[in-house]
Amino acid sequence: MLFALFALLFFFVPAVDTSAVLESAQAMQEFDLTADPASPQWAKAPRVAADRDYLGKPIAGAPTEIRSRWTKQNLYLLYICPYDELNLKPDPDPAKETPQLWNWEVAEAFIGSDFTHIARYKEFQVSPQSEWVDLDIDRENQKGQAGMKWNSGYTVKGRIDAQAKVWYGEMRIPFAAIDSRAPQAGREFRIGLYRIAGREPKKFFAWRPTGQTSFHVPQAFGTLRLR
């Protein structure tokens, strides 16, 4: 009996919470942004779903899906966003950064490479109209943070399929903007994946609910793992 109990304890391995990990599959070469989930680059890419709000309450309807790929230069993210009604900014200008884009329809990624100072991370957004904003966030020093003055050099592609009532948002983020090290298989980042959808009352999709009425809760981020 004691031996059986000892063996059980010795060989017990705690279960891994796979819902906290988004794996990113390596692509051998860079590819154009098409925001097409059926393309060869995206059809079989690893993915997670965001189907709850930031407090953890289930959101009715189809979930938001996020897929990821990576190359030696860039991290790619693709958002698949079913919708009932789009909340689009009038007169979009994708050629330049859009301040306060979060007031409209948008998908967001918060990414940090510092596991010691988790309040430091980068924020990237894409809209259905290919609008964008990138920010350098430091929750420990909000007056000193670069915020929107920072420029990551990332690019985006938004696309709306009005017949299917789905919009797609794709990001290509230079690794140099999020980490001083060259990417390699097994490298991990801290990541939060979110979406703000519709008109009032808006829906706030979270892959990893934050437990607060804000996405800026780095303690709730999950893990992005390069494979």
Image: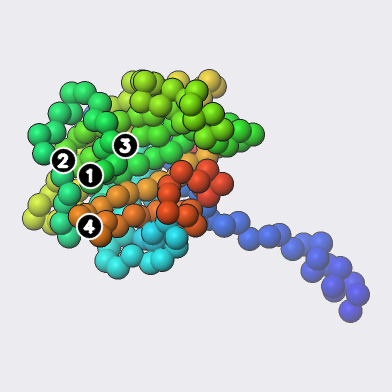
Q: What kind of residue is marked 2? A: Lys
Q: CA distance from mark 2 to mark 4?
A: 14 Å
Residue 217 position, x and y percent, is 50, 46
Is 198 located above or below residue 191 in the figure?
A: below
Q: Where in the figure is residue 34, as x and y percent of width and height? A: 20, 36
How far, Cα to Cα, is label 4 from label 1? 11 Å
Q: Position of residue 65 (x, y in %)?
A: 33, 52
Q: Sequence order check: which comes first, mark 4 or mark 1? A: 1
Kindly report which numbered mark, 3 or 4, lies closer to the viewer in this rendering.
Answer: 4
Amino acid type, residue under disc 4 in the picture: Glu
Quarter of the image for residue 205 reads: bottom left
Q: Which residue is mark 2?
A: 89
Observer-nearest of 175 and 98 = 98
Corner quadrant of residue 26: top left
Q: Could you tell me how far apart the alpha carbons at marks 3 and 1 are, in whole angstroms?
A: 11 Å
Q: Are marks 3 and 1 in contact (CB under 8 Å)?
A: no
Give the class, few, some or many, for how many residues have Cα within 10 Å of label 3's Cα (few <14, many ≥20): many
Between discs 2 and 1, the one toward the N terminus: 2
Say which residue label 3 marks. Answer: 125
Crowding at label 4, few (<14), some or many (≥20) Cα neighbours within 10 Å? few
**Residue denoted by label 4:** 200
| Secondary element at tag 4 | loop
Instruction: Please say if the residues under marks 2 and 1 sit with CB atoms less than 8 Å apart.
Output: yes
Name the foreground residue: 12 vs 58. 58
